[in-house]
Image: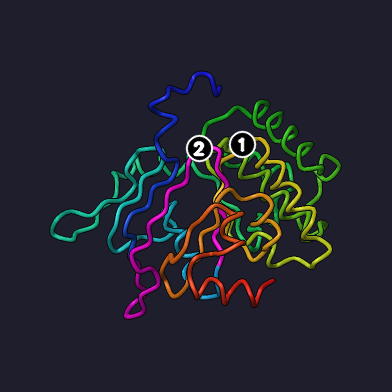
Amino acid sequence: MPNSISDTTRDVPMIEARGVHKAFGANPVLRGVSLQVRRGEVVAVIGPSGSGKSTFLRCLNHLETIDSGHIAIEGETLASTDAQGRCSYAPEAELRRICRKSGMVFQHFNLFPHLTVLENLIEAPMVVQGVARGAAVARAEALLAKVGLSAKRDNYPERLSGGQKQRVAIARALCMEPDIMLFDEPTSALDPELTGEVLRTMRELAEERMTMLVVTHEMGFAREVAHTVAFMDQGELVAARPAAEFFADPGHERARAFLQHML
């Protein structure tokens, strides 16, 4: 509960990345990216395709490994680099525990096609967390109600629209009770008329003070919901400002050109 969080804990960034570098072969994808996300903050990461946004997000929960830099989640070190430039990760058990602090929602849903909606939601809590089936079902049903999909609990993913699949994916991530939600372009695979229902769910999470890092092309969401907008280009995080300030003046020529193209 919020009143049980000490002032010291409250001041620790939920996500802290410093000087993160990542290359695929000879192709540098992240060039010294640094970003902090505070408790209850919504940060929108925007920028042109190929700028490293999704790779950065995937590095934060170990779906990709970094070459150098420092990543900490709620004050616990996920990856660090020593004075000789050697990057190392936390021990395996600790790594898994730290990564469970974050829930991830992907562009293409990644639902299990052979499982019903309910089964998709209860699988990880039961297998990974050891939650009893009855408790996992109760948690899943509450979250399906939250995203407006209680009537779809026994459907298979193939019977759902794209927007419904993405809301199921959000509920599935929330079933693990994460402290942080990471969204990787959650509406980019959707038809325009289905985008609104997913953004509505994300707005509700923001209103509940869920810590969120959102890679998105939805400028309206970034402007209206995000506290901070971070702009990436060519593997660099070149501008990060409060949303209102960013859209008034992002403070960087590459970011200005991007906004002129998008708005």
Quadrant of image for the C terminus: bottom right
As drawn, the label of residue 209 is 1
Q: What element carries label 2?
A: loop
- Identity, as a three-letter code, of the amino acid under mark 2: Arg
Q: Based on the picture, tell me whether residue 33 belongs to the magenta stretch.
A: yes
Which of the 4 quarters of the picture holds residue 106? bottom right
**Residue depicted at x 59% and y 54%:** 243
Distance between mark 1 and mark 2 Cα atoms? 8 Å
> Magenta residues, as a range?
22-46
The x, y position of residue 254, in whole percent, is 50, 75
- Badge count: 2
Q: Is the magenta stretch mostly helix, strand or loop?
A: strand
Q: Residues within 10 Å of mark 2 (few under 14, many from 20)?
A: some
Quadrant of image for the N terminus: top right
**Residue depicted at x 35% and y 67%:** 22
Asked if 53 appears above or below 176 in the picture, the reply is below
Q: Based on the picture, tell me whether residue 259 belongs to the magenta stretch.
A: no
Pick the front one: 115 or 6: 6
Looking at the image, residue 197 sits to the left or right of residue 57; the answer is right
Q: Is mark 1 on a helix, strand or loop?
A: loop
- Identity, as a three-letter code, of the amino acid under mark 1: Arg
> Can you identify the residue that label 2 sits on?
39
The x, y position of residue 51, in whole percent, is 48, 72
Asked if 98 appears above or below 194 in the picture, the reply is above
**Residue depicted at x 40% and y 42%:** 73
